[in-house]
Image (cartoon, rainbow, N blue to C red):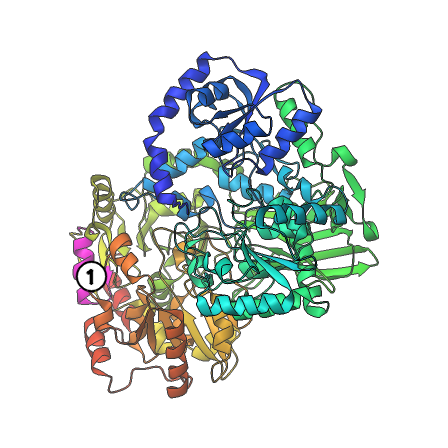
Amino acid sequence: MARFTFSAGNARVLARAPLYAIGALCARLVPRDPRRWVMASGLGLGEGALALWRYTRENDPERRLTWLASSDEELRAARAAGMAALPARGWGGFRATLRAGAVVVTHGLGDANRYGSSGAVVVQLWHGIPLKRLHLDTGAALRLPLIGSLPGARALMSALYRRGGARITLFPVASELVAARIRSAFGLGPERVRVLGDARDDVLLQGTALSRRDAARALIAAATGPLPEAARLVLYAPTWRDGEPDPAIPDAAQWAEIVAWAERRDAVLLVRSHPLGAGSYAAGPASSPRIRLLGSAQLLDVTPALPALDALLTDYSSIAFDAAIAGVPSVFLAPDLAAYLGSRGLYTPYRAFSGGDPATSWTEALARLDGALEEGAARDAVLAHARWLRDEHVDLLDGRATERVHAAVRELLGETRSPRAGAATGSVGTGAAGAVGTAGGPARVVIDDAELDPETLSLRGTAPGPIRRLALVGPRQTIELAVHQTGASFSASAPLLRERWGSPPLPPRSDEYRLEVTLEGAAHASRRATVTAHLDPGLRSPWLRAELRADAGTLVLRVEPPLADDERGASAQKRLEAGYRARTAAPETAVMFESFYSQTAACNPLALDAELARVRPDVTRYWSVVDRSVAVPEGAVALVEGSAEWWRVRADARLLVVNDWLRKRWRPRAHQRVLQTWHGTMLKRLALDRAGVGLRTRIAVTRESRRWSILLAQNPWAAGVLRRAYAFRGPVWVEGYPRNDVLLRGDRAAVRERLGLAEGQRAVLYAPTWRDDRREIVDYLDLPGFAAQLAALPGEHVLLVRGHSRTLRFGRDLDAPGLIDVTSYPAIGELMLAADVLVTDYSSVMFDITAIDTPLVLFVPDLEHYRRDLRGFYFDVTAEAPGPVVRDRDALLQTLAELAASTPAVGVERAPAATAPPALAAWRARFNPLDDGRAAERVVARILAEGLLD
């Protein structure tokens, strides 16, 4: 079976770079003929390219079409079908591609002759609605073998993907929602990504339901042999796993169970493993004629066969969207959900895609198939979910996508003007209760008026039913709207300033917030709406800049920092920075605090701010913030990064207190000092201590550390590492960590109340570190599912999920029963104070929590990968850990169950016990000798004693 991995594929892309250059040169010399079109598909003779070929041959017979084949078998099949065909890789394929006005592909430029496409109208008919993140949207697609961990490797692959995407002229998609994904994944502008429908899916919408089913059943019979006349057909179609074997391949006992089920149900199970997958299903057909292979060797293109199915069984495959268009219910089997989500990101949360928790075993999957095949509530539920998948992701259900694509290609060639989405059938129709939908598509909420003022967002419109909930949902925050509805008409409003985590009212985080509506009786929320309102250009207040726009098939609120017009953009910042560097500073007795690149007010700087306010209230305390959503301490002044006042204070303040790199936007002044507090004792290797550090990185590290006047360390061991790793020559203050003072002196009950934790609930805090090869929180647990399993343990458990600060901008909050996503909660120390158990991996929080007696568990499923490929460690934590070390989900759950049984929820008193187990005692002696609740006092006392504010 064919195998593919992203890293190997990317290596081949790099190796072919010179050939692309030669092809581009040839394309300049050879004129293109708009009458000539070449078509190809990575699947073979099928997909949307074949649909467009057939339509063009019938309706545009003067067009000179050539099919480019990737194999001898495909070439023979094309010629046998009466198609002009050439080998894609040969000279003939290169010449045909060079001369073609249009090049049509389904998987990428490599379907045709990749070297001859420069300058053509390139039409990318993608091979399914994407669920898994693609190209620029996932680190998995940017991997390289051997050199993948070197600085710049990912940036290089990103640039190459963008360069390849730039060749695409037209990318037809199924909906506005899908269009947003494709624009992001391929780096394309909106003019290139058009909602015309998927040509490959027209076959699922043309004719009658009975004719489609009969034709599809005949296809399957021709591919696999005669079918029992009344037998139900179930297709099992797992996706691929970047070269890894499919973990759901049945063993002998499971095959016997499947055969018994098929005989009892009078069913035939068709198995279609992914063409790029790994592993064998051959044992199934060998055990019974009720199990049949329907791989690409038996039936190249499975889409036309979907109407024959009574049910689909899949995992993460986009075939579920196609089945939904065909009206086929899906059951989901995902035994490796945690591992899969740990390596691949999804555009839609998995449980929204699957309609709930997936089956994790064949026994469970067969039981769910029973429900899907029998009339009743279970079947009604899976059919309703299929309709939701279809209506959410498909705007046009008229079966005329191929016609629209053909017209669009001709328009791009300058031959005619093509209809826009839906134009062939009237474009817009009116659905139930006055709601508007595109031709043949679902009725949706309509927004016909939208207004923003400095304090309130107001909407008016119509809905196809009673609205249960209306909200603008962002990655890290949700704006709930109050709805008033009379019949189909509704109005809704929400204040723009709101309390969060106990803060004063603040604006939303800078981000995009998409309208989400849940109708009464609906099983799922919809992120689709038709926007007919005239949208104002937006507003600016002292708190935020905001604008409303129609995008991704819904209404979007975009929030940005409240910078003035002359402070926005690269040129404005360049001018302000030049002024900052040139001006003569006016020293101010003030401190400028910055935490995690201004994303929050937290960590050691926050603790020092509180102590400074106590002993020197006359000192002005400024906080650098990315926007005004960041809550700063009472009495402090928030400065939006990049504002004119921010630049002034950066020059004038006598002391800067930071916990991460200052970055390049700082110039040393004679009156200024920089206190670098850092943000944790380290297990993972840092800076110059990392393997394979190049000259550029060494220069950057050394230049950065030269900006620091003083370095703060939690303990003597960390002081030595920091000095060496950053080649730091100045003084290192070893005073304990101010951020840990709250562990011994904080108000636990107040923090738990802010988090919404009830008395007696056992809070498990999961706080992994970030990964160099991904931007979002690592999830080897399937956290929503893990929260459900925690709930079944003795006692009332709540899972607190805390992503690393580096994942704050890129991920999105999880939402599940028994789970609270606290990634945006400012103070990690307060979260540890509130927790009854801390679970982490390689994060520095392991060195903080041991200042008190809260149990620590290390969950290290990717230990070897992290040690060998990502960072490496300063010592073997598995040998020295002061608590249990586990490597898989089941072991972690068992450990937490044992802790729940042996240690009651921790009370208010948090100081360490008088005696501790030997491993914990040794750990504390090494890492926590100064974490006594007074570290901030000592550090501020030294700041004042050494005259840093004078």
Question: Can the viewer see residue 164 in this picture?
Answer: yes
Q: Is residue 649 left or right of residue 699?
A: right
Residue 421: image quadrant is: top right
Q: Taking 860 as reference, is 444 above or below it?
A: above
What is the quadrant of the C terminus in the image?
Answer: bottom left
Front residue of 362/115: it is 362
> In the rendered view, does 490 fall on the left or right side of 9?
right
Q: Amino acid at mark 1?
A: Tyr
Please tell me whether the stretch drawn in magenta is mainly helix, strand or loop.
helix
Q: Position of residue 40 (x, y in %)?
A: 53, 31
Tell me which residue sits at (69%, 53%) in the image. Answer: 327
Rendered position, 302 above or below 90: below
The residue positioned 42% from the left and 27% from the top of the image is 89
Q: Name the spot of residue 328 as percent of width and height, x first.
A: 67, 55
Find the magenta span and give its range. Answer: 712-727
- Identified at 40% across, 34% down, the residue is 160
Examine the structure image and report whether residue 719 is included in the region drawn in magenta: yes
Callout count: 1
Q: Is residue 223 left or right of residue 26?
A: right
In this view of the protein, can residue 552 be seen by the observer?
A: no
Residue 548's x, y, as percent? 64, 45
Q: Which residue is mark 1?
A: 874
Bin the neighbour count of mark 1 within 10 Å (Cα to Cα): few under 14, some 14-19, many 20 and up: some
State the image quarter where residue 682 is shown: bottom left
Relative to 489, say whether 304 is above or below. Answer: above
**Residue at the image point whose x is 37% and y is 74% from the top:** 891
Q: Is residue 166 magenta?
A: no
737 or 27, nearer to the observer: 27
| Front-most of residues 154 and 762 | 154
Q: Position of residue 948 (x, y in %)?
A: 25, 56
Q: Secondary structure at mark 1?
A: loop
